[in-house]
Image (cartoon, grey):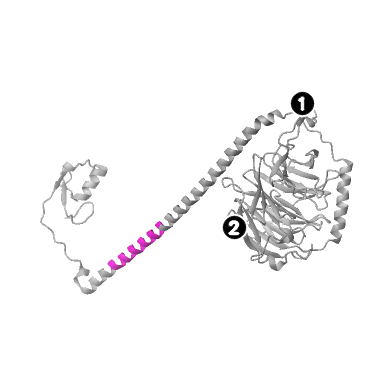
């Protein structure tokens, strides 16, 4: 007789008093403990209802395949195959366990290093806080009775007049300032006519061999991301603005951080050197612009804090005179400042548009300003009259970056759909680069100082050789984004294009250049 559950001859047969059915003892016991009923009839069933059946010991017949030598060899082969498969599975499990252990050890080591770094930053913050607390009583005694003293470089609010609507009155760009801009424009235009490409400029063959030379962790690990960078060529120092709300001044030849500029409360969106590197202008998502001044010990201290915008400041650009600069904001206005005093001479809004500005740059001659908007437009402004003299349409998405060529004729703009090149003489688009798919935005675009190369950044970094309007602009080099984030947010050529500095959405500044040569020469 066979078991009512397995259908095989039971080794320990038992029978149910209620149904009279035969079962294997171990199977019916497990079923009763799980369900408490008969597996066939569904009636309630307990172990007391099960009666063992006494039988003689059954000798199982030998399998047919074990009755001959070929059959036994077949059985041995099957058992050997099973053993080998089991051994292979064990080896795979061992390899997986080793990988998991290695990964766990690496994570533990990284966690220990992060904890050590955080402890160091905490101790530094505590020391700075203690120092600030000691200085508060001293600062309180130096405030003038009329309350008009300046603190931490901030301008006295009472110096600005207000109209009844609450809008600030600006003095405007005076005639002597305009004359200064025009004189600078005339001088630079004459220089451009005589200018030749320097013999020290990196040739195409060298750029084709560029690779990553160094990677420097400049910003905090808990808020990674470098959003902007600028290079002061004579000193070969690099400034970066980060998501961690800090700006960092970095000496590339020595590989050392010169100064970390803390003061903004939100991410630093743009940085620009001014006045021979003695000043640094930063714009931030906290709606402010700060001007930092270099001190004798090499640090940069906050000298001015400007609060003329009502939304995020997305761009700052310094005029060629090094006496004036412009900030552009998502509030839809751009401000023209006197660099020495921090006075906003003009705040310009386009009455016909409500879109905010996402990028801005002065033309090399300084009389026109290019600004990209969140609505995919590029606007050209006459700085003297603050009039919008041209508009370029055709992009998709916010214009993330804008760069004028040193020849004064070409303008490059970047957006979601790639890079467009514009001929400023005919006010038309003459070439478009679409290096990425529609889901990948081009984050940055930059001409080198000689106007010979154009670089753009997105999911990688691409360098093109500049040509004429009708000639092809050949791709010279494609450099990978080694940050792993897929976003090369900012880039700039070094002196004579001898290297390319790249910032991405991790905390590292990367330097790409010619391997095996001293790249610190400028």
State left or right for residue 337 relative to residue 519: right
Tell me, yes or no, whether the two marked residues, 2 and 1, touch with CB atoms within 8 Å. no
Query: Foreground residue, 130 or 224?
Result: 130
Q: Which residue is rendered at x = 62% and y = 33% of the image?
A: 133
Q: Residue furthest bottom?
A: 70
* Mark 2 nearby-residue class (10 Å; few <14, some 14–19, many ≥20): some
Is residue 357 visible to the viewer in this orientation of the structure? no
**Which quarter of the image is occupied by the N terminus?**
bottom left
Q: Which residue is rendered at x = 23% and y = 51% of the image?
A: 5
Residues drawn in magenta: 78-97
Place of residue 143 in the rendered image (x, y in percent of width and height, measured from the top left)? 72, 29
In terms of secondary structure, where does tag 2 sit?
loop
**Residue 88 inside the magenta-drawn segment:** yes
Q: In the figure, residue 468 lies in which quadrant?
A: bottom right
Dot in front, 2 or 1: 1
- The mark total stands at 2
Q: Which mark is residue 482?
A: 2
Residue that mark 1 sits on:
146
State left or right for residue 409 relative to residue 19: right
Place of residue 42 in the rendered image (x, y in percent of width and height, measured from the top left)? 24, 43
Q: Which mark is residue 103?
A: none
In terms of secondary structure, where does tag 1 sit?
loop
Is residue 102 visible to the viewer in this orientation of the structure? yes
Q: Which residue is rendered at x = 70% and y = 68% of the image?
A: 205
Q: CA distance from mark 2 to mark 1?
A: 56 Å
Place of residue 297 in the rendered image (x, y in percent of width and height, measured from the top left)? 69, 46
């Amino acid at each position: 007789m066979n078991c009512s559950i397995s259908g095989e001859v039971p080794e320990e047969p038992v029978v149910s008093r209620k149904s009279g059915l035969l079962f294997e003892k171990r199977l019916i016991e497990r079923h009763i403990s799980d369900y408490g009923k008969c597996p066939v009839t569904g009636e309630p069933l307990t172990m007391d209802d099960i009666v063992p059946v006494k039988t003689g010991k059954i000798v199982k017949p030998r399998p047919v395949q074990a009755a001959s030598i070929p059959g036994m060899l077949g059985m041995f082969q099957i058992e050997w195959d099973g053993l080998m498969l089991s051994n292979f599975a064990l080896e795979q499990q061992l390899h997986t366990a080793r990988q998991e252990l290695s990964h766990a050890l690496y994570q533990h080591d990284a966690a220990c290093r992060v904890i050590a770094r955080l402890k160091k930053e905490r101790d530094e913050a505590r020391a700075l806080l203690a120092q600030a607390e000691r200085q508060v009583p001293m600062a309180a005694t130096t405030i003038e009775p009329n309350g008009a003293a300046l603190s931490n470089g901030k301008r006295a609010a009472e110096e600005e007049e207000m109209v009844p609507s609450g809008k600030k009155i600006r003095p405007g760009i005076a005639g002597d300032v305009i004359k200064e801009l025009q004189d600078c424009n005339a001088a630079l235009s004459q220089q451009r006519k005589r200018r030749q490409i320097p013999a020290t400029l990196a040739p195409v063959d060298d750029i084709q061999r560029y690779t990553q030379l160094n990677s420097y962790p400049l910003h905090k690990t808990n808020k990674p991301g470098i959003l902007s960078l600028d290079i002061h060529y004579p000193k070969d120092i690099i400034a970066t603005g980060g998501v961690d709300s800090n700006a960092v001044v970095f000496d590339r030849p020595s590989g050392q951080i010169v100064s970390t500029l803390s003061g903004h409360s939100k991410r630093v969106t743009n940085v620009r050197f001014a006045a021979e590197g003695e000043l640094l202008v930063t714009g931030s998502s906290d709606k402010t612009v700060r001007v930092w001044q270099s001190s004798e010990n090499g640090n940069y201290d906050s000298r001015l804090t400007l609060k003329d915008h009502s939304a995020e400041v997305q761009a700052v650009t310094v005029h060629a005179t090094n006496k004036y600069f412009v900030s552009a904001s998502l509030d839809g206005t751009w401000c023209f400042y006197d660099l020495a005093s921090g006075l906003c001479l003009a705040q310009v809004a386009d009455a016909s548009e409500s879109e905010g500005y996402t990028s801005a740059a002065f033309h090399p001659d300084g009389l026109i300003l290019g600004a990209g908007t969140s609505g995919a437009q590029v606007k050209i402004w006459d700085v003297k009259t603050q009039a919008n003299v041209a508009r370029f349409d055709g992009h998709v998405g916010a214009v993330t970056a804008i760069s004028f060529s040193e020849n004064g004729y070409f303008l490059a703009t970047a957006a979601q759909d790639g890079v467009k090149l514009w001929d400023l003489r005919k006010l038309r688009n003459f070439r478009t680069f679409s290096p990425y798919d529609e889901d990948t935005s081009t984050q940055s675009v930059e001409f080198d100082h000689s106007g010979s190369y154009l670089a753009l950044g997105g999911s990688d970094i691409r360098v093109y050789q500049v040509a004429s309007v009708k000639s092809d602009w050949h791709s010279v080099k494609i450099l990978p984004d080694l940050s792993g984030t897929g976003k090369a947010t900012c880039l700039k050529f070094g002196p004579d294009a001898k290297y390319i500095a790249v910032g991405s959405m991790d905390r590292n500044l990367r330097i790409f250049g010619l391997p095996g040569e001293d790249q610190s020469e400028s």
